[in-house]
């Protein structure tokens, strides 16, 4: 009948971090313990908010022009595509980012790291992907910063990304890292990702994206779940 | 071609830098006839409030439609809705999506309208519900649950997702509770009263 719509593939166990991950201490009282209830992908799950059309400003993707002057730090271009597992671009989807400044400080009351705030840097950006699923931000490279998870704990430099895709089932919030960061082996948050999948969160230096005399370019593609081929396949890929 | 999906990471404690919208909690604008406030608290396994969580809701409009091309029944606000719910308003002002960060006491809330029931592919009906995503520091991925409505006992009793939860007490935790003019829905991430979370 007409209400039968294909669901989305369900990732196997090798993709996402487990919620219960003792090395990241804050999971201890927050990770649910009971088995999840299976949720078939029906109308509410295969639809989702299509946000941002006409609401994203022309400069929202450029975190270096949001104030009177330029932020301090290493200017970078970060760009990529939002694709689904089938390699199809996800067009017109809202991408939201937030990050620390070049000194490793967030513009947030809760950030007590004694590094300077930058009056010319808020650390938030948004854009819509184009018809090919492409997105692009101009920003400064965020600094590493300490946190209190364990003695001498430092987060590797990262940018937070929020993605909607086209369906509730595709919603994803994640973090992008920079290649070759020596803090990787010490970070329990990146380390929570199954080892074979960790490098999917690491951008790569791209000399084609790098702009001469202006900014290094880092490329990172984001892959959201793809559609099941037919509704009959719904159950086949469950972990 | 199969590309490997991107893993999730925690939203962290500082998401307010980038994810706060002034109209985040407004699934419908203030003053919308029939609007209802749905909210509650996010609590951890010790029963303490989670002050750095983000709660998002997604739902059908009052006639049970989605303004989305993958709703095979056509655009939201089609036919047969309550008289005060004009088709024009349905598409232009019903966002379907709500976003609320928790405050220091772990409280979240959205202003919305009760969604309509939905047809299920097996000929059954899904009771009116909101799909809910919860993100927080300490959650390495989102957790998903549903909010059902207390005045829909009959529809809830026939809802396929609710029916799949064997424990009646757990099932009841997915039904919001009337409180004042609105509905209360607490989210217990862990513990005795852990909210049933759904495998999306």
Image (spheres, rainbow, N blue to C red):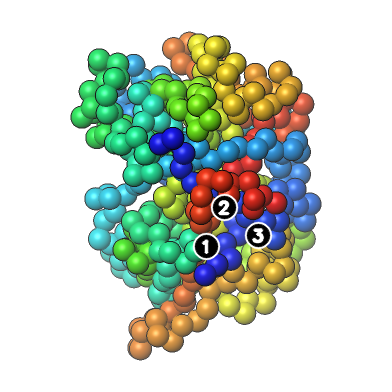
The local crowd at label 2, few if under 14, some if 14 to 19, many if 20 or more residues have their Cα within 10 Å, is many
Q: Position of residue B72 (x, y in %)?
A: 37, 39
Out of A232 and B51, give the one closest to the viewer: A232
First in sequence: mark 1 vs mark 3: 3
What mark, if any, has residue A85 been given in the picture?
Answer: 1
Q: Are marks 2 and 3 in contact (CB under 8 Å)?
A: no
Label 2 secondary element: loop
Q: In the rendered image, which residue does mark 3 sit on?
A: A15
Q: Marks 1/2: CA distance?
A: 9 Å
Q: Are marks 1 and 3 in contact (CB under 8 Å)?
A: no
Q: Are marks 1 and 2 in contact (CB under 8 Å)?
A: yes
Q: Residue at x 61, y 51 (%)?
A: A10
Q: Marks 2/3: CA distance?
A: 12 Å
In the displayed image of the protein, which residue is found farthest to the bottom?
Answer: A212
Out of B164 and A27, give the one closest to the viewer: B164
In this rendering, the count of numbered labels is: 3
Q: Position of residue A133 (x, y in %)?
A: 38, 64
Is A203 above or below relative to B144?
Answer: below
Q: The residue marked by circle 1 belongs to what chain?
A: A
The answer, for residue A67, to whether it is visible in the render is no
First in sequence: mark 2 vs mark 3: 2
First in sequence: mark 1 vs mark 2: 2
Q: Residue at x 75, y 52 (%)?
A: A21
Q: In the rendered image, which residue does mark 2 sit on?
A: A9
């Amino acid at each position: 009948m007409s209400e039968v719509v294909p669901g989305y593939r369900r990732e196997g166990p090798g993709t996402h971090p487990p919620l219960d991950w003792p090395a990241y201490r804050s999971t201890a009282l927050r990770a649910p313990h009971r088995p999840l209830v299976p949720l078939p992908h029906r109308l509410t799950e295969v639809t989702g908010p299509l946000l941002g059309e006409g609401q994203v400003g022309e400069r929202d993707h450029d975190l270096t022009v949001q104030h009177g002057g330029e932020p301090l730090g290493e200017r970078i271009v970060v760009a990529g595509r939002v694709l689904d597992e089938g390699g199809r671009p996800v067009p017109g989807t809202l991408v939201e980012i937030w990050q620390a400044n070049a000194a490793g400080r967030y513009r947030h009351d809760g950030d007590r790291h004694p590094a300077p705030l930058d009056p010319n840097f808020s650390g938030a950006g948004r854009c819509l992907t184009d018809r090919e699923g492409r997105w692009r931000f101009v920003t400064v490279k965020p600094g590493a910063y300490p946190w209190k998870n364990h003695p001498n704990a430092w987060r590797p430099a990262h940018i937070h990304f929020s993605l909607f895709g086209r369906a509730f089932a595709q919603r994803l919030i994640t973090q992008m890292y920079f290649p070759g960061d020596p803090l990787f082996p010490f970070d329990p948050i990146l380390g929570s990702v199954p080892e074979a999948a960790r490098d999917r969160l690491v951008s790569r230096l791209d000399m084609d994206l790098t702009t001469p005399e202006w900014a290094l370019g880092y490329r990172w593609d984001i892959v959201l779940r793809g559609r099941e081929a037919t509704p009959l396949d719904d159950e086949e890929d469950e972990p | 071609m199969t590309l490997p999906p991107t893993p999730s990471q925690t939203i962290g404690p500082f998401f307010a830098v980038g994810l706060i919208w002034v109209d985040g909690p407004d699934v419908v604008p203030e003053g919308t006839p029939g609007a209802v406030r749905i909210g509650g608290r996010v609590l951890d396994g010790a029963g303490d409030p989670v002050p750095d969580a983000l709660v998002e809701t997604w739902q059908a409009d009052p006639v049970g439609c989605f303004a989305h091309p993958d709703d095979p029944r056509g655009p939201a606000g089609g036919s047969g809705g309550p008289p005060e719910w004009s088709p024009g308003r349905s598409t232009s002002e019903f966002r379907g999506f709500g976003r609320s960060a928790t405050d220091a006491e772990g409280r979240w809330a959205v202003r919305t309208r009760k969604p309509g029931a939905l047809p299920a592919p097996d000929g059954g009906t899904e009771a009116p519900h909101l799909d809910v995503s919860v993100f927080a520091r300490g959650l390495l991925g989102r957790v998903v649950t549903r909010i059902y409505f207390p005045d829909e006992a009959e529809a809830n009793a026939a809802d396929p997702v609710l029916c799949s939860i064997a424990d009646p007490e757990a099932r009841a935790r997915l039904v919001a509770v009337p409180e004042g003019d609105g509905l209360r829905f607490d989210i217990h991430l862990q513990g005795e009263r852990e909210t049933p979370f759904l495998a999306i």
